[in-house]
Amino acid sequence: MIEFPEFVLRTLFAGLCGLIIGVDREIKSKPLGARAYILVAVGSAALMVVTLNFSLGSIADDRDLSIDPTRLIQGIVGGIGFLGAGAIMTNDESGRLRGVGSGAAIWGSGAIGVACGLGYIKEAAFIAGVIFAVLNLYDWFQRG
């Protein structure tokens, strides 16, 4: 079982990583603001920890019960895909998609939350760094 202090650490760290990405998007006035990135990361982490605790507790109580916590990851990925799709719009005359970067970044925030929820804190920090770098390096190269 994952104890409450560890739950708090994992979810808060996920929120911090989501904040790093969200602030970048907020500063650039992108479709999804910092709040969305924080909430997706925290929610994903919290769901993972609660699911792990449920599956560990249930399996310990009933050996005939089969629970697969990885199915939650599939649900998170699909659910955040809908949120990301909402950030993608075709509102310019050329028909060019807008908001694809934000849609992909929010999906990455979900991955950060899943990693934190599973206890992979260093990996989550790395994912946040890569996403932040891609969002900023791409802009830098595009301007140059």
Image (cartoon, rainbow, N blue to C red):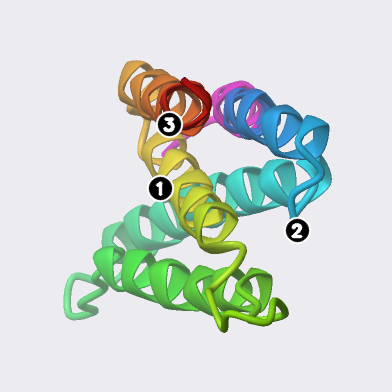
> On the picture, is 40 further left or further right than 126?
right
Disc 3 or 1, which lies upstream in sequence? 1
Q: Residues within 10 Å of mark 1 (few under 14, many from 20)?
A: many
Mark 3 lies on a secondary structure that is: helix
How many labels were placed on the picture? 3
Q: Which mark is residue 31?
A: 2
Mark 2 or 3 closer to N-term?
2
Of mark 1 and mark 2, the one earlier in the sequence is 2
Quadrant placement of the N terminus? top left
Amino acid type at mark 3: Tyr
Q: Point out which mark residue 73 bears.
A: none
Q: In whole angstroms, how far apart are the C-alphas of marks 3 and 1? A: 21 Å
| Residue type for callout 2 | Pro
Q: Which residue is mark 1?
A: 111
Q: Determine the residue positioned at 80% across, 37% down.
A: 26
Q: Amino acid at mark 1?
A: Ala
User: At 64% from the left edge and 24% from the top edge, which residue is drawn?
Assistant: 20
Pick the residue in front: 129 or 70: 129
Which residue position holds label 3? 138
- Marks 1 and 2: which is nearer the front? 2
Which residue range is magenta in the image?
Answer: 1-11
Q: Main secondary structure of the magenta part?
A: helix
